[in-house]
Amino acid sequence: MCNFVAVLQKTMKEQSESKYRHVLKYTGIFGSVQVLVILIGLVRNKAMALLLGAGGIGFNSLMTSMQNFASQATSLGISFGAVPRLSEYFEQGDVRRQEYYMMVIRLWSLIAAVLGLLLCVAVSPFVNEVSFTWGDHTLHYAMLGFSVAFMALTSGETAILKATRHLGSLARIQVLTAIVAVILSLPLYFFWRHGGIVPAILLVSFATMVVTMFFSYCRYPLRLSYRRSLLSDGASMIRLGVAFVLAAAVGSASEMFIRSFLNVEGGLDVVGWYNVGFMISITYAGMVFSSMESDYFPRLSAVQKDIAATNDTVNKQVEVSLLLLAPMLVALLALLPVLIPMLFSREFLPVIGMAQVTVLAMYFKVLTMPVAYISLARSRSLVFLSLETSYFLVLVVAVVVGFHYWGIYGTGVAIVVAHAFEFVLTMTVAKTKFHYRSTGTIATYALAQMTFGVLAFVVSLLFDGWIYWITEAALAIASTAYSLNILRQKTHLWEALKQKFVRP
């Protein structure tokens, strides 16, 4: 009996270690691709900062926020809703149904492209009125419709590659399009400065579409056919993705409103500062989340009917994501005074304080995001929509209040407040509606790592010179050592590396 219990405990431990290794592996793979894409993007951002200044980055931010809003509002949820059924046909090896459903996806992508183009043209006069107090940029906003159309067609092909497990192709597409974006946009910025911003957006979105179609069409050639059933058979795909689309549209609209508000109240320089602070603190740090949709969400969906398995999957994702991200946050917070002028220019020095406080929001995000996916895995899309809408409403109000009282620094405080609110709300809903239970282990890890992060932030407020760098380095090393020690215990990380790289 004792031997049986010992064997059972050993088996359970090995299974747990295997799950941790899986999460660590795929978070590392997709995160590495994202790091490469970010590094390539840094070249573009540096050139934009030098050639266009804060005002140019602010103008680009306004254009891209409108582009994203129109894309999300008219995408019909194809990138999300198309995946489950096509993935099912792929797993079954049903080639005939695969080919037919790809025609459904491509037809609805074309419909979304036309809707996006028409929306941009229709709302461009209104958006120009609320976004600018000078000049007429109606034509700029209308021209974005072509970019939105290109993005819709790209989204359909991306869904096909994702559903058919061509993750390697998706990774190559990300890297190639990042390189192409640099090659196409820099000459436009150099010769036409602000006048090259909208053409660059159009060219980059067109190039992204061409590259994505190349990879997709090589594997699944385009078949031109029209049947009325193609429209009706896409209805379920649209229904599945509509809440996801609405949530994304609310987010894009909120970001567009925030940037328009900052432009009216503070000018394009303030929009540029906000965009850089947001980008470097949230977008760049979010590389750890890049595996969520490709790896974590399918695993969570597979066990969504089992409460215990769901909780276990979510908690392991939270633990690994927190342990990987936390040391990066401490290092990022400490290095921002060097990174911002180096990656952009000294014109962006006023954003350092805002970016440092914004980093703290990522501690709440890493605890919230895996839990928020439970509602999507269980097809409770309205719950997901409600959570996202509540968060963005709080974010908008907090940014308006924060900027009014504390300027650009106040927008960073607002982002932290909004993420803290989202954390509390998401945990409450997950507990009451989905019987989610976090663990004491997560609470311990979060308390330890957030302590390192808060201390690093306090040091940034109180000290400078050699005291600042020594203290921040010590905190970064301590946070890293803490995470590595836990990952070593849970995954036998060192033993796996030895087997891989050291020959007996």
Image (cartoon, grey):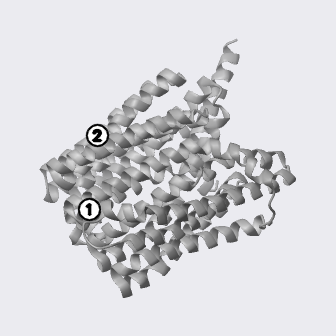
The amino acid at mark 1 is Asn
The residue singled out by tag 2 in the image is 417
The picture places residue 463, in percent across and down from the top left corner, at: 13, 52
Please indicate whether residue 374 sits to the left or right of residue 343 in the image: right
Q: Nearer the viewer, residue 62 or 227?
A: 227
- Rendered residue at 37%/88% (across/down): 191
Q: Is residue 339 above or below residue 361?
A: below
Outermost bottom residue: 191
The amino acid at mark 2 is Val
* Residue 108 location, quadrant: bottom right
* Residue 114 location, quadrant: bottom right
- Rendered residue at 40%/66% (across/down): 63
Please indicate whether residue 370 sits to the left or right of residue 504 in the image: left
- Rendered residue at 45%/76% (across/down): 200
Mark 1 crowdedness (10 Å alpha carbons): few <14, some 14-19, many ≥20: many
The picture places residue 193, in percent across and down from the top left corner, at: 34, 82
The picture places residue 360, in percent across and down from the top left corner, at: 30, 45
Please indicate whether residue 62 sits to the left or right of residue 182 in the image: left
Q: Is residue 383 above or below residue 504?
A: above
Q: Nearer the viewer, residue 363 or 130?
A: 130
Q: Nearer the viewer, residue 24 or 284?
A: 284
Q: Which SS class for mark 1?
A: helix
Q: Is residue 80 above or below residue 220?
A: above
Q: Which SS class for mark 2?
A: helix
- Rendered residue at 36%/59% (across/down): 279
Mark positioned earlier in the residue sequence (1 or 2): 1
Q: Calculate the distance from the C-alpha at mark 1 to the C-alpha at mark 2.
A: 22 Å
The picture places residue 194, in percent across and down from the top left corner, at: 34, 78
Q: Is residue 72 visible?
A: yes
The residue singled out by tag 1 in the image is 263
